[in-house]
Image (cartoon, rainbow, N blue to C red):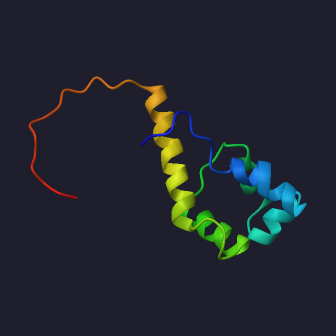
Amino acid sequence: MTMFNPPHPAEILREDILPELGLTVTEAAKQLGVNRVTLSRLLSGKSAISADMALRLHAWLGENSPTPESWLHQQANYDLWIASQKQQFKITPTQSLNYSC
């Protein structure tokens, strides 16, 4: 089921996690091992959560935090929704193929 207008996955970091931890962007970036600009762009929704960042977030937040796969799944849902809003494709379907994934 596709969510309507899903939030950028970094919203939870910006709105919930950093305030709860009482950390600034600079402090959080240092703990994550990334520069401040990288984390700031992520928190503002200008960049995506990469596989590397998903691993860092999980390691930083601990075993009871969202898994790297969860971060990436949220990012994929967000990216797909954004792409679907930008362009309506005019594609003629090809013949049906029988294959399984």
Q: Residue at x 74, y 71 (%)?
A: 33
Asked if residue 91 shows in the view, the reply is yes
Question: What count of labels does the image hold?
Answer: 0
Q: Point out the image quarter for the C terminus.
A: bottom left
Q: Nearer the viewer, residue 37 or 5?
A: 5
Asked if residue 25 shows in the view, the reply is no
Q: Is residue 35 above or below residue 86?
A: below
Q: Residue at x 52, y 33 (%)?
A: 4
Q: Is residue 23 left or right of residue 62?
A: right
User: Percent position (x, y) of residue 40?
Assistant: 77, 50
Q: Is residue 47 left or right of residue 76?
A: right
Q: Is residue 25 above or below residue 94?
A: below
Q: Is residue 6 left or right of residue 12?
A: left
Q: Residue at x 19, y 26 (%)?
A: 92
User: Percent position (x, y) of residue 20?
Assistant: 85, 59
Q: Residue at x 77, y 50 (%)?
A: 14
Q: Point out the image quarter for the N terminus.
A: top left
Residue 65 location, quadrant: bottom right
User: Percent position (x, y) of residue 31?
Assistant: 80, 71
User: Percent position (x, y) of residue 41?
Assistant: 72, 48
Residue 2 location, quadrant: top left
